[in-house]
Each structure stands twice: as structure tokens, then as C-alpha cells.
Amino acid sequence: MASPKPCAGSPSPCDECGARCCKRFLVAVVPTDVERIAARLRVPSSSFIEAYPAEKCNCVHAPSFWVDGKENYIGLRREGSGCVFLSDGRCRIHSFKPIVCRTFPFCLNGGSVERSTFCGKEVRAEEGEKGLLERYEHELKLLRRDAVEWNWRTGGEKGLGELLGFMQGKARERRRISGIISKLKF
Ligand code: SF4
Ligand code: SF4
């Protein structure tokens, strides 16, 4: 298991911090996260994803989905004091964790990389962090579109199981399209 962030040096700042971000925040996921984690762990996505009532949480960057007649944010399940994949301050899925976990504590603001004030440690940006952040922004844009489609198509009445199937279908569709595009490049 590794520290929440892929920090260079030992001990890493995340070790010293005690994974405060993994304990504090709801980790909102995008379809490619759901598909990748389910495939790597060989478990159904319902075992690690939960719907969180919008009225009880404040998720500023991800869109909400209507599930069973209620507005929810979709994120990694939380157990005890933090993320379900946090164990003794370490991430059990470090090499394939959600993209937002890879980018935190950095974000894009007007095209520039900024650091969240929540993380007070000297966490280093990953190599290619800006590209990763741009990819995350792109995935969030697609997720917002998915949320509109889901909410409109289902009228908000379907359950979480159906929503997870919908999200994994979106991830497969995007993988197929990017495969076609990469073959067309010359
Ligand atoms: S990214 Fe920052 S807040 Fe999160 S575990 Fe590392 S040091 Fe702590
Ligand atoms: S997936 Fe890993 S890095 Fe992300 S919140 Fe959970 S324990 Fe932390």
C-alpha cells in the first residue's frame, strides 16, 4: 500500500499528515474510475460506490444525479472515518485510484495549476500534472452531460444499480470511441 499521493521521498508528506483529505472529502467519481476500479478489484461497483444525498453534502465540482427520486452525489463509499480504501493511513488502490485522488491537492484555475489550501504539506505535483488536470476537467464535463442525460431519461426514479450500469456503459463507449480515433490518426 502507498501514501494517498505518489510523493517522492520518505517519509512522504501524506504519511505525516495522516491522510486528512481521504478522511474529509467525498471522493466524486467519473465513469472511467468506476469501470477501472471494478475491473481491477473484480468486484461489482456497488461494493465501493455510494449515493450521498445532496442535502447532506457539499460537492462543489461534480454534478448531481437523481436516484430513487432524490438528488445525490455519487462517490466512493465511506466507512468509519474515511474512504473505504483507506487503511492505516494508506491507499489500498493507489495504482488505479480515482483521477481526482491523483490530482489532489492541485486544480486548474484559468488554465494555471493551483494548490488547495486544505493541504498544508509540500506535496509535489505528479509529472504531467497539468495534462492530468486537463483530462479531469474533460471527464467532469462529460460527467455533467451524463447527469443531464440520466436525470432526463429516468425522471430521477431509477436506482443506484441502474445508474452504475449507465456509468460503466459510458466508460465503455468512450473507450471504444477513443480506440477508433487513435486508429484514424496518422
Ligand atoms: S494530499 Fe495533502 S491532505 Fe492529502 S494526505 Fe497528502 S498531505 Fe494530507
Ligand atoms: S481512493 Fe485512496 S487516495 Fe482516494 S480517497 Fe480513497 S484512500 Fe484516499
Image (cartoon, rainbow, N blue to C red):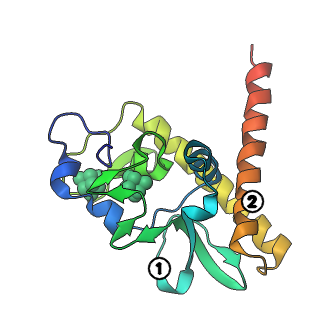
Q: Quadrant of residue 39?
A: top right
Name the foreground residue: 118 vs 34.
Answer: 34
Count the marks.
2
Q: Which residue is mark 2?
A: 165
Question: In the rendered image of this protein, does residue 169 appear above or below residue 77?
Answer: above
Q: Residue at x 53, y 47 (%)?
A: 136
Answer with left or right where residue 60 lies relative to residue 144. left
- Percent x, y for residue 172? 75, 44
Quadrant containing ligand 1 reads: bottom left
- Percent x, y for residue 105? 33, 52
Question: In the rendered image of this protein, does residue 73 appear above or below residue 125?
Answer: below
Disc ID at residue 57? 1
- Percent x, y for residue 59? 48, 71
Name the foreground residue: 3 vs 44.
Answer: 44
Answer with left or right where residue 45 lies relative to residue 119. right
- For badge 2, the amino acid type reads Gly
> Outermost residue, right direction?
153
Q: Residues within 10 Å of mark 2 (few under 14, many from 20)?
A: some
Q: Residue at x 33, y 43 (%)?
A: 1
Q: Residue at x 46, y 52 (%)?
A: 100
Which label lies toward us, 1 or 2?
2
